[in-house]
Image (spheres, rainbow, N blue to C red):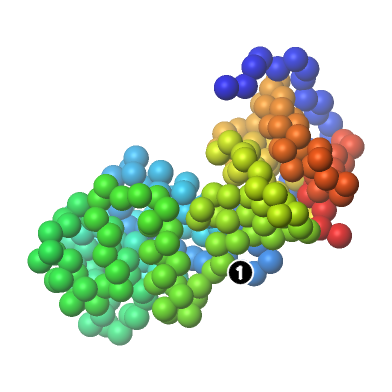
Amino acid sequence: MVNQPTRRVESSTQEKKSDSKDRSDTAVGAASSPIHLLLVEDDKVLSKLVKRLLTKSGYDVDIAADGEQAETSVMTKHYQLMILDLNLPKKSGLQVLETLRKNGYSIPVLILTAKDKTEDRVKGLRMGADDYLGKPFDSAELLERIQAVLRRSGSERSSLLQVADLTMDLVKRTVVRDGKEIKLTPKEFDLLAFFIRNKNQTLTRRRIAEQVWGYTFDTGTNVVDVYIGYLRENIDKNFKRKLIHTVRGEGFVLLDE
């Protein structure tokens, strides 16, 4: 838990101008185009949690809350994978799957449902699902299953992020620099992943707070500075080359040059 701030974050006109530009950028900012996933789930709490997990792993995620919305989404936008619940309002997941397959949509489908009996699995796979995972599920297994389906469909995205001599594994949640494993808290890990996905870009405190913490930036808190301090202590302090730099009046940048 972060202690009460000992100083206030300075706000400037220059930072506000920079923030306006930042908002037009993609949240992921990876070197390659993001993988687009459609999460079909009517449980609002669960869909929010799963979307957060997938977004932090570098995916671009849309949510459909019922079967009809799922069909419309697939028919109007290109997705590399659909994560499909079976117990849905308006149209069941199996009805959605049947409709899409009958109409020639080959989008890979990973069923994620509480209906986990053998006969349910067999029926879902026979109707055209590419994989089947029961609830409750392990987050790491879900990410691995997604990777496996994308790999089979030719849309695989590496779970590794690399900058200089530092490597992050988004599935195993590990960080290694110059052969040395570095232990980070979950929030430090998310912050570092965000920096690497947006390497060589100046990031304002506002953008970091909104994307990593998920809340509107408050100039009365220095939580961003506190955690960047923690991150520097872990990944930069004992290494000759420093990765994270302060851009006076604007924010921070992770340099890969």
Please say if 106 is above or below 201.
Answer: below
**Which residue is rendered at x = 12% and y = 64% of the image?**
118
- Which one is nearer the viewer's eye here, 128 or 177? 177
- Which one is nearer the viewer's eye here, 154 or 46? 154
- Which one is nearer the viewer's eye here, 183 or 19? 183
How far across and how far down the image is residue 39, in percent?
37, 58
Quarter of the view holding residue 158: bottom right
Say whether residue 35 is visible: yes
**Which residue is rendered at x = 38% and y = 56% of the image?**
141
**Which residue is rendered at x = 64% and y = 17% of the image?**
3
Quarter of the view holding residue 82: bottom left
Please say if 12 is above or below 144.
Answer: above
The N terminus sits in image quarter: top right
Name the amino acid, label 1.
Ser
- What residue would you read off at disc 1? 33
Whether residue 242 sits left or right of residue 198 in the image: it is right
Quarter of the view holding residue 111: bottom left
Say whether residue 89 is visible: no
